[in-house]
Image (cartoon, rainbow, N blue to C red):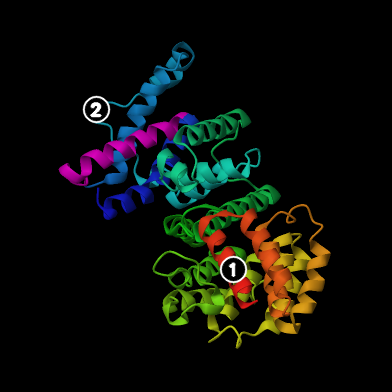
Amino acid sequence: MTDAHEDLLRQLAPQVLSALVRRHGHFDTAEDAVQEALLAAAQQWPTEGVPNEPRNWLITVASRRLIDLLRRDGARQRREGALAQQVIPDDWHAPAADQLASEADDTLILLFMCCHPTLSSASQIALTLRAVGGLSTAEVARAFLVPEATMTRRITRAKQQIRDSGQRFRMPEGDDRASRLDVVLHVLYLIFNEGYAATAGPALQRGELAQEAIRLVRMVRALLLEDSEVAGLLALMLLTDARRPARTAADGSLVPMSEQDRSLWDAALIREGVELVTEALPRGAIGPYQLQAAIAALHDEAPSLEATDWPQIKALYGLLLRISDNPIVALNHAVAVGMADGPQAGLELLTTIEGDSRIAQDHRLHAVRAQFWEQAGEHQRAREAYEVAARLTASVPQQRYLRTRAARLVAEG
């Protein structure tokens, strides 16, 4: 199957699922039917060619499969009457666009369903990647380094929870809509982070996950052009992903920002990200994604680590701390303080957050402490902190980098 076929199927997957759920209901069974239609397309289109109306083709196949599944589902008598008017004849064609709600709006509704507040964060991510991203269960499982059977159970439970919630296929309203959008953006943010800096496994980053998160945020951005936080999240992802080509050496080892060849950074992504955040910041209230994007822009526009505007980054993290009770934000603020005011100032700030149970066992806290001790000339303390950080991370490239730093300090005496 070609990349063009895969891209088309991923683009059409949420539209097809939205059409089925709006027409028939049964989110959980409809999602299974769509996956089977996507599989059929993956098998047939490369040899038979893409149909003239690929979306309608998928809807037709998925709708027939959905009804087969419902009929086979042990509740045929209860559903027979309701389905009698929905059975699809051989010459059935998918509804015209004007017979359905906007495809774009339907896709956003689908995202809100996948990020239902009753679901765990892991389930929201898995269901979003499968139902909206069009990834197979096996692909989602590989992305998060878990067995396919484990991911199948996770996705199945998530779909059952949505079904049991009784949620109808419609856009949330009022405060519920705003809170659900926050969840959607957070889920996409987590997907991007896992792609950009994998939490476990042999690879430092999983580019396909980061790219999928960017694609989904672009889609949300196209639907909500006036939302500054959506623009901020897209800008943050672009500005961060722009550095990806320089983050690893030829052997896959980690290259810290201080040592990266900045000529490898993607200038087009940086320009787009800066334009987005510049446009978003003056509009309305400033949210956490806009602030993080502004920080990322300062990093990306600096010619070197030393030339970075650390006082401005410190100030922006201070603003971010006022609206975000997040220990990683506090840690990044400490880094900025250490870079702006010296390592001792950074170490003092670390003592105020190291008691937070949410970060006490996070390797990043100990890695930052090691960096400050090294800058302060306390090499023994720095080496010990690097070794602790290496033990706490499940990322193989991170482990190797941290142990290399510790070994270098031993060699230097």
Image vertical order of residue 98 relative to residue 162, above or below: below
Q: Based on the displayed image, in which of its 4 quarters is residue 407 positioned?
A: bottom right
The count of marks equals 2
**Label 1 to label 2: alpha-carbon separation:** 70 Å
**Residue 33 inside the magenta-drawn segment:** yes
Q: Which residue in the protein does label 1 denote?
A: 407
Q: Quadrant of residue 315?
A: bottom right
Relative image position of residue 375 (x, y in whole percent) = 69, 79
Residue 271: x, y in percent? Answer: 47, 79
Residue 179 visible in rendering: yes
**Residue occupying image coordinates x 70% and y 63%:** 365
Q: Which class describes the residues within 10 Å of circle 1: few (<14), some (14-19), or many (20+)?
A: some
Within 10 Å of the Cα at label 2, are there few (<14), some (14-19), or many (20+) other Cα atoms? Answer: few
Q: Amino acid at mark 2?
A: Asp
Q: Is residue 281 left or right of residue 214?
A: right
At 46% from the left and 41% from the top, the residue drawn is 141
- Residue segment shown in magenta: 29-51
Counting residues from the N terminus, which is met first, the one under dot 1 or under dot 2?
2
Kind of residue indicated by mark 1: Ala
Task: Please tell me whether residue 393 is drawn above or below residue 58 in the rendered image.
Answer: below
Judging depth in this view, the residue of 57 and 381 nearest the camera is: 381
Look at the picture and state if 374 lies above or below 134. below
Q: Nearer the viewer, mark 1 or mark 2?
A: 1
Question: Which residue is labeled 2 in the image?
Answer: 90
